[in-house]
Amino acid sequence: MNPTKTNKTVLGYFVLFVWGFVSMGVGLRQNQTSEIKVGVVLDLQTSFSKICLTSINMSLSDFYKEHGDYTTRLVIQVRDSMEDVFQASAAALDLIKNE
């Protein structure tokens, strides 16, 4: 066998293998969603905060219903401030450290 022809054949198979591997990876990545966590600190004892939280959730739901092909999703992490400024600070710190 001709060494040049063998090298071209091996190179051809190698390129085909790499192309197949890369295209498989691209195909798999299309179905994956990435989540972005967003922290929200509200006083959940008030009706205003409940309306705000409902509005946030409804707007996210409506957005993703219209844009189902988006692979990035916002995930709302809610903490209660319990009508206290210091508790609100602690809740925000908890979100930063743990979420």
Image (cartoon, helix red, strand yellow):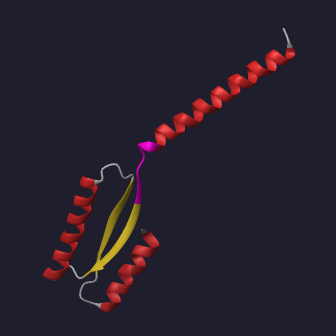
The image quarter in which residue 62 lies:
bottom left
Residue 34 sits inside the magenta stretch: yes
Residue 31, horizontal then vertical, whole percent: 41, 43
- The structure residue drawn at horizontal position 31% and vertical position 91%, both measured from the top left corner, is 85
Residue 12 visible at all: yes
The image quarter in which residue 46 lies:
bottom left
Residue 37, horizontal then vertical, whole percent: 39, 65
Residue 45 visible at all: no
Residue 6, horizontal then vertical, whole percent: 80, 16
- Asked whether 35 or 70 is in front, the reply is 70
- Asked whether 49 or 83 is in front, the reply is 49
- The structure residue drawn at horizontal position 54% and vertical position 35%, both measured from the top left corner, is 23
- The structure residue drawn at horizontal position 24% and vertical position 84%, both measured from the top left corner, is 82
Residue sitting farthest toward the left = 47
**In what quadrant of the picture does the N terminus appear?**
top right
**In what quadrant of the picture does the C terminus appear?**
bottom left
Residue 68, horizontal then vertical, whole percent: 30, 50
Residue sitting farthest toward the bottom = 85
- Asked whether 72 or 75 is in front, the reply is 72
Q: Is residue 53 above or below residue 71?
A: below
Q: Is residue 29 above or below residue 86?
A: above
- Which segment is the magenta one? 30-35
In the displayed structure image, the side of residue 13 where residue 30 appears, left or right: left
The image quarter in which residue 75 lies:
bottom left
Residue sitting farthest toward the right = 3
Residue sitting farthest toward the top = 1
Residue 82 sits inside the magenta stretch: no
- Asked whether 42 or 35 is in front, the reply is 35
Counting every numbered tag in the picture gives 0
- The structure residue drawn at horizontal position 44% and vertical position 43%, both measured from the top left corner, is 30
